[in-house]
Image (cartoon, rainbow, N blue to C red):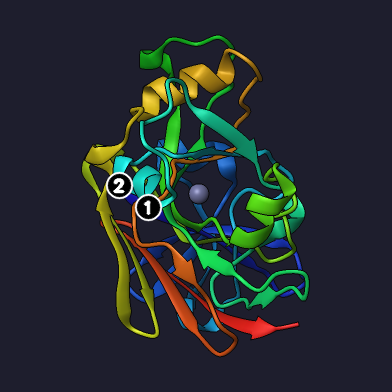
Amino acid sequence: MMKIARYLGRDGEILEGVVDGDEVHEISGLDTMLRGGRRVGRKQKITEVKLMPWGIGRKIIAVGKNYADHVKEMGGSAPPESPVLFMKPNSALIGYGDAIILPPQSTSVHHEAELAVVIGKRLRRASEKECAEAIAGVICLNDVTARDLQKSDNQWTRAKGFDTFCPVGPWVVTGLDPTDRAVICRVNGEVRQNGRTRDFIFPLPKLLAFVCAAMTLEPGDLFTTGTPAGVGPLQAGDSVEVEVEGVGVLRNDVRAQ
Ligand code: ZN
């Protein structure tokens, strides 16, 4: 298992590095991720680098309603018969420590703590087994959602697509089994969501096979697996954390526009 961070280099380029304790050691690129990464560059203190999100320039695919307790809190009576897919725009991505900006169009912006995976291999009409083997690593994602607009728009693109509505981080963990992980959200230190991925309605390999039967998944694409019960509003001044057991904590502050 390795933690691999993306962070900003001195000249504004995005670097990749292995996280080791409180240090990050630069490695030579995404395709080395599954093979251990060749350490090529400098070591820096993790607190001294600007962590960047994974998924920049790639697809971000998501599933709604994948935990029964969340389906219930959203007013649904039965779990969906097939996965409810949507996408988030790349322009929504932010990293660890960046601010979630509340847009003036919404009065109800919610947190959604989720386990997300980074795809490591091209997948097209692949089997569930091939999909499971193509997961490069696990990361924390906050599927920030304007709940009022999600309902009134009758379509989720705008509600889930505002700038800053896709915090991802703090780093990818390779070789981590995602099938029974705690997924926790804290707002100002108080636990708001606390679920486990073993309670998915659709298991991850099944979801990925469902997705790549429609669209090719490419290395570096993100897939996020849905949120457990306990979603709720964020206010300006809040600090929101998404923790995935075995990965780490993604922290972002919330600001008014
Ligand atoms: Zn979600």
Mark 1 to mark 2 CA distance (whole Å): 6 Å
Which residue is pictured at 57% across the width and 18% down the height? Answer: 212
Q: Position of residue 17 (x, y in %)?
A: 51, 59
Q: Is residue 86 above or below residue 82?
A: below
Residue 127: image tag: none
For the residue pair 11 and 87, the one nearer the viewer reads as 87
Disc 2 crowd rating (10 Å Cα; few below 14, some 14-19, many 20+) is some
Q: Is residue 10 left or right of residue 213?
A: right
Would you say the residues marked 1 and 2 are in contact, meaning their CB atoms lie under 8 Å apart? yes
Which residue position is annotated with label 1? 73
Amino acid found under the numbered disc labelled 2 = Asp
Q: Position of residue 241 (x, y in %)?
A: 41, 72
Which residue position is annotated with label 2? 69
Q: Is residue 34 above or below residue 181?
A: above
Which residue is pictured at 41% across the width and 50% down the height? Answer: 227
For the residue pair 218 and 10, the one nearer the viewer reads as 218
Q: Is residue 255 visible?
A: yes
Amino acid found under the numbered disc labelled 1 = Glu
For the residue pair 161 and 166, the one nearer the viewer reads as 161
Q: Position of residue 125 (x, y in %)?
A: 55, 9
